[in-house]
Amino acid sequence: MVRSFRPWLLIALLLTSCESDGLVVQPPAGSSPSPKSVSGTPRSESVPLPSHSPSPSHSRSPSRSPISEGRRPNIVYVLTDDLDWNLVRHMPEVQELQKDGVTFTDFFATNSQCCPSRTSIFTGQYPHNSGVFTNTGKDGGLGAFVRNGNEAKSFAPALQKAGYRTGFMGKYMNGYYPGADGNPKRNIPPGWDEWAVAGNAYSNFDYTLNENGEVVEYGHEPKDYLTDVLSRKATSFIGKSAQANQPFMLELATFAPHGPSTPAPRDQAGFPGLAAPRTDAFDHATVNGPKWQRRLAPLTVREKQDFDSKFAKRVCSVQSIDDLIGQLRRTLKAHGVAENTYVVFGSDNGFHMGEHRLRPGKQTAYDTDINVPLVVMGPRVPADEKVSGIAATIDIKPTFLDLAGLRPPATVDGESLTGLMHGHAEKDWRQAVLVEHRHTSPQEGDPDAAPMNTGNAPSYHAMRTADALYVEYAHGEREYYDLDSDPDQLTNQWDDLPSADRRKLHAWLADLKACEGADECRAAARRPS
């Protein structure tokens, strides 16, 4: 039952930055060809998991924005929490989305933790430029997000100013509370026309939403299940936007499958006997691994059984997300806007469960944690294709602005994926992406607080290329994995590298760590000669 709720007496720092994005409309683009796979690799007919493939030969070209047809496209973005590739094989609606669009096989989170990753998505900036490294404290959470002017740097104000009807529903930032400071109307960031956001709603029941300035409490009835509530609100938002004949951008940010991975009541009995994937990395100690991993004991039988139960629960919890995607597509079609709408599906970070003998968690530089799904369907997007160009969470903002016919500001570190998603080659595309992690001790109130055996590694900077992973820890240790011969990242080959190669890797990573803005980060992402 929904009823009024007295605002919580909690305070979240809210500031407004004077920075804004330029609203320069891109020139109309010509019609797009019907390309084959951008990756140049054979398509998989059924398996949705990514595969390592060489970096494509691209040709950088001007933006091909769909506004040339006279109608600005709509954008619907479904962002999940802690969803890794192992779950996609259990999501038939997502697999249908893959068949009808493109899958970015080499899409990476710039930080495998909620707030830093979501900040990169909103702003198009690496953590070292956004100022958000963790979920709490001076360098994390909503406080750091606001203090560093990231609300104004989000893609929402620019889209709203350009005439888009904008909506955000679900999970925003760690530290956000619907009724903070006793004035919920002030607790809505700039740029959003429709706002339905929860605070600590990881159980998907018994939570509150700030609904356009009114704090509303939800209970424990089946109809209160949060993902389903978001689905109903999205249906209403799309209907109103279509009726107003106004282009719209809607982000739906689910709390699932983040722990406790509560499934919808209808899905609780699903997938009995399902086991967590036993990859080559499962219960396998990293050869020549860093010191923080050497204390990891082999997994016990009881732990493996527990992992199986948790994995099955995670699979159950994403069924409602799959239902949401199906409902979104039906709603778009019913209102006659499906042909002019981009549907984007992704995750803020991945998740490991037994790989490298790590207990369930994230925050490492391994692919289990940083290589996350990104699927796009929309106008002139080729069907059932894979894109192997290296992409990252910093590319979401410039992509959305580009799709709307706006020129991304020079302050973003990422680049628009519009060309790649439409099957066009891009010359001089990036060859590396930066991953940044800052270690913090577990803090009360942080849903990702974790001991080191779950992956909360010492602080590091890492660089992921098409064929290698390189990690530099703050205390001096190094990791290097050749992904052609070691795709599961099981053997650290740093000690075997020639000194010249070590120096080149260090210099390349140093350039990425220091880059600011599109031009510098584009240059830093290219392999030094």
Image (cartoon, grey):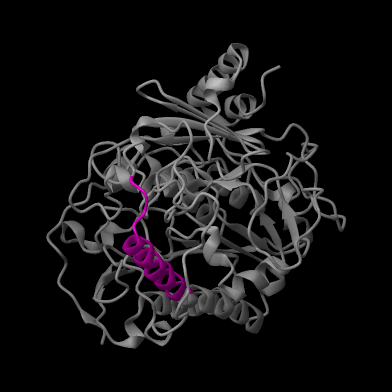
- Which picture quadrant has residue 414? top right
Nearer to the camera, 20 or 312: 312
Lateral position of residue 29 relative to residue 136, left or right: right
Would you say the magenta stretch is mainly helix, strand or loop?
A: helix
- Point out the image quarter for the C terminus: top right
Image point 28% across, 58% down: which residue? 187
Q: Give the percent coordinates (x, y) of residue 358.
A: 38, 48
Residue 62 vs 190, above or below: the answer is: above
Please say whether residue 438 is one of the residues in the magenta stretch: no
Nearer to the camera, 180 or 163: 180
The answer to whether residue 195 of the structure is visible from this angle is: no
- Which picture quadrant has residue 447? bottom left
Lateral position of residue 213 relative to residue 169, left or right: left
Residue 469 vs 196, above or below: the answer is: above
Q: Which residues are magenta?
A: 297-318
Q: Give the percent coordinates (x, y) of residue 370.
A: 50, 46
Image point 73% across, 55% down: which residue? 386
Q: Give the percent coordinates (x, y) of residue 331.
A: 59, 81
The answer to whether residue 49 of the structure is visible from this angle is: yes
Nearer to the camera, 43 or 383: 43
Nearer to the camera, 168 or 439: 439
Image point 55% across, 80% down: which residue? 327
Please say whether residue 307 is one of the residues in the magenta stretch: yes
- Point out the image quarter for the N terminus: bottom left
Residue 136 vs 204, above or below: the answer is: above
State the residue lying farthest toward the left.
Answer: 9
